[in-house]
Image: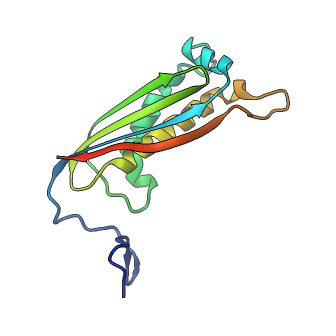
Amino acid sequence: MVNKTLTHLSSNGVRMVDVSDKLVTRRIALARGKIYLKESTINLVENEELNKGNVLVTAQIAAISAVKSTHHLIPLCHSLRITGVDVDFQVERNYIMITVNVNSTGKTGVEMEALTGVSVGLLTVWDMVKSVEKDENGQYPSTTISEIEVIKKEKD
């Protein structure tokens, strides 16, 4: 017998949950996460002095693209009609926080899309700053991606 609380399991293995009987509603999810960096790296990002280009604009584009591609990355996610994505940054002395707000009109939530956007946005920041984050031993002691979380999920 299949446990009904584990919605992605079936007697044949796994399945994509059938949402065809759900009502179409407006869905919103807001997620955020941080990347901790050296203060000198933060200054380079803020002043757009990195050789790879504008870190925050590139991370915004990456986050939006990731939101739209979530169903390709997470095996059992539904393909959703995303109606809007906002990506914002809070730059502090030792970290950059990215916040991704996703809107959709559909039958299932968009929190996985928001989390994916945050994750890829942070990874993009990491990719663009890694050359200046190394210490004299070639290590990255200050660089940490963490605190990725859903902070709001709604449906109307």
Most distant residue in the bottom direction:
1
Asked if residue 38 is positioned above or below residue 119 in the image, the reply reads: above
Q: Is residue 71 left or right of residue 53?
A: left
* The quarter of the displayed image where residue 103 is located: top left
The foreground one among 148 and 19 is 148
The image shows residue 58, relative to residue 43, as above or below, that is below
Pick the front one: 70 or 136: 136
x and y, in percent, of residue 42 in the image:
61, 20
Numbered circles on residues, count:
0
In the rendered view, would you say 110 is above or below 58?
A: below
In the image, residue 118 lies at what x, y percent? 46, 39
- Taking the spot 78% from the left edge, 35% from the top edge, the residue there is 139
Residue 29: quadrant of the picture: top left
Residue at 26 percent of width and 55 percent of height: 108
Residue at the location (38% across, 72% down)? 6
In this picture, residue 138 sits left or right of residue 78: right
Quarter of the image with the N terminus in it: bottom left
Give above or below for 120 relative to 134.
below
Give residue 31's position: percent from left, percent from top. 40, 40
Residue 82, position in %: x, y? 27, 43
